[in-house]
Image (cartoon, rainbow, N blue to C red):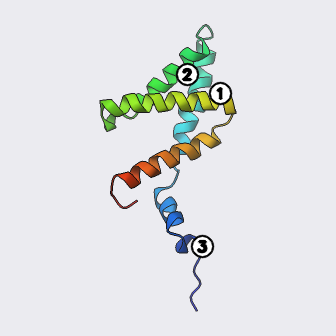
Amino acid sequence: MQKVSLLKSCRFLKKIKRFGPSFHVPLEIIYRGFLIFSLTALFPSFSLWAVLIISSLLFGLAHTYQGFGNVIRTSLVGLFFAILYIVLGSIIPLIVLHFLIDYVGKIGDGEDV
């Protein structure tokens, strides 16, 4: 009898393995962890809201390959993520949320995930 691992037997887990959160981790570390901290340290006179908006706009601009409309949308999602980061004090939930948003969006493309 052939052994079948859980990873091979579960379709959802196979998709996660292929799609992987590998690029979500550095994005969240850069735009939430590093950038918010750095902007706050470099520009102490900026309000927290200004720092969150700047980091969110830069996050949106990093998605210019998706078109102008998606830059606006991604900036708004980035602002929501930045607020969550401040409230929760951790980027781990944001990495998971970022992955899930991209995963569901990929399913909606009609392509094989």
13 shown above or below 61? below
Residue 100 percent across, percent down from the top left: 51, 49
- Label 1 close to label 2 by CB (< 8 Å): yes
Separation of marks 3 and 1 at Cα, in angstroms: 36 Å
The residue type indicated by label 3 comes to Leu
Residue at horizontal 54 percent and vertical 75 percent from the top: 9
Q: Which residue, given by chain and number where applicable, does mark 3 sit on?
A: 6
Instruction: State the mark number for residue 86.
Output: 1
Q: Secondary structure at mark 3?
A: helix
The residue type indicated by label 1 comes to Ile
Residue 106 percent across, percent down from the top left: 40, 52
The one nearer the camera, 24 or 80, is 80
Q: Which residue, given by chain and number where applicable, does mark 2 sit on?
A: 52
Instruction: State the mark number for residue 15.
Output: none
Outermost residue toward the top in this view:
45
Q: Secondary structure at mark 2?
A: helix
Residue at horizontal 53 percent and vertical 73 percent from the top: 8
Question: Which of pointers 3 and 1 lies earlier in the amino acid sequence?
Answer: 3
Question: Which of pointers 1 and 2 lies earlier in the amino acid sequence?
Answer: 2
Quadrant location, the C terminus: bottom left
Dot 2 surroundings within 10 Å: few (below 14), some, or many (20 or more)?
A: many
31 shown above or below 18? above
Residue at horizontal 37 percent and vertical 52 percent from the top: 108
